[in-house]
Image (cartoon, helix red, strand yellow):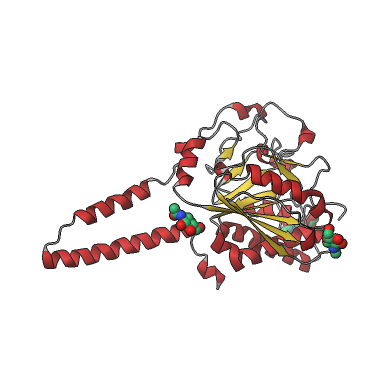
Amino acid sequence: MARQFLLSHPMNSMRHTKVILFLLILLSLWALHRKYHFSTRHLQKMSQCWFQARQTELKLSDWFHPTQIVELVKKNLTITEWSAPIMWHDTYDESVLKKYYADHNITVGLIVFAVGRYLERYLGRFLISAEKFFMSGQKVIIYVMTDNFSAVPWVYLGRHHTFKIFQIGREKRWQDVSMMRMKTIRDHIVDHIQYEVDFLFCMDVDQVFRSSYGVETLGESVAQLHNFWFWAVPHMFPYERNNLSEAYMPKGKGDFYYHAAVFGGTPIQVLNIVRECTKGIMNDKKNNIEAVWHDESHLNKYFFLHKPTKILSPEYCWDYLHGMPPYIKNVRLSWNFKSYRPLRESN
Ligand SMILES: *[C@@H]1O[C@H](CO)[C@@H](O)[C@H](O)[C@H]1NC(C)=O
Ligand SMILES: *[C@@H]1O[C@H](CO)[C@@H](O)[C@H](O)[C@H]1NC(C)=O
Ligand SMILES: *[C@@H]1O[C@H](CO)[C@@H](O)[C@H](O)[C@H]1NC(C)=O
């Protein structure tokens, strides 16, 4: 049932409604005109407005200007073979994007899971930094999924930010925590998130925003380059190599290694991502298989089959353990000090 509601993006359906409305008006004015030789000046004005509205669709070349900086890593990391932009500092015109989104009245959702020890250790800093840097100037709803309601810290949010907290069940193993995330996201998008936001991000909680994380990151489906593997070639990637797993990737295949700490898109696209990943995880479970990097392996398989429309450079999820190479100039979000994997140990 939910599927029917989700057939199109809210902006698309608005556009369809507009077209239908326009045609109805056209029809009725035509009828009036036949009867009364009614002036069509108003109609002309309306159709002008309509065409102007259509013309304000952004083209990639309006705002995206890839530069050479990234050639430093000896790999084309500015635009993909399927023409998806890869976002780095200095590759986009912020004023064009800001103006475009100012006219569109959008709401951006951000889902974060805070369970077990991660709740008290990381959630406060994540939320405070999100309030400061995530989509400033846009309406934002932050969805906190937690297993302990009473431990959620009180954080002051500005007038554009709203907070929604949901209680989720406890999983014993951290592998299950990370895999059940996909299913929980799916259920919440179907239940309510699809009606509440135009774009949605899902992020790990053990990260901190460092500078502006803005509308340049919005897209139909958005993937994050992994800050350790972005320089590597596909046969090196830590994809799932067991051919019995749904996440299986043959050696040499693949475009990039994506990081499950950040992914996003429109609610319908995020729903597709998590629905397919959940299906893969469940089928593997039935066959007693667990992919090498759990939900991340399934996410990588998904983005191999369904190419993301926008990719975020490692500046959008940096790990200071790798230092600061010259092509990393503007870190937007970073992992917390410790560890190679978030959500992956000691729960
Ligand atoms: C923007 O959207 C909100 C609902 O999300 C609505 O209440 C408000 O009137 C809209 N504003 C404009 C200028 O369209
Ligand atoms: C939930 O958090 C509260 C406040 O931090 C704490 O006192 C309580 O023990 C926690 N409950 C569980 C089940 O961890
Ligand atoms: C799957 O992998 C096994 C060993 O890793 C191999 O023997 C088998 O032929 C492979 N099956 C397919 C369908 O590729």
Q: Residue furthest bottom?
A: 1
Q: Quadrant of the C terminus?
A: bottom right
Q: Which residue occupies the foreground of this view, 278 or 110?
A: 110
Residue 118 vs residue 84: left or right?
right
Image quadrant of residue 147? bottom right
Q: Number of callouts in the render?
A: 0
Q: Quadrant of ligand 2?
A: bottom right
Q: Is residue 248 visible?
A: no
Q: Residue at x 62, y 45 (%)?
A: 134
Q: Residue at x 48, y 61 (%)?
A: 8
Q: Residue furthest right?
A: 346
**Residue 102 image position (x, y, % from top left):** 47, 45
Residue 7 vs residue 76: left or right?
left
Image quadrant of residue 295? bottom right
Q: Is residue 70 above or below residue 12?
A: above
Q: Which residue occupies the foreground of this view, 324 or 118?
A: 118
Image quadrant of residue 61? top left
Q: Is residue 229 above or below residue 201?
A: above
Q: Is residue 81 above or below residue 5?
A: above
Q: Residue at x 82, y 49 (%)?
A: 121
Q: Which residue occupies the foreground of this view, 17 or 247?
A: 17
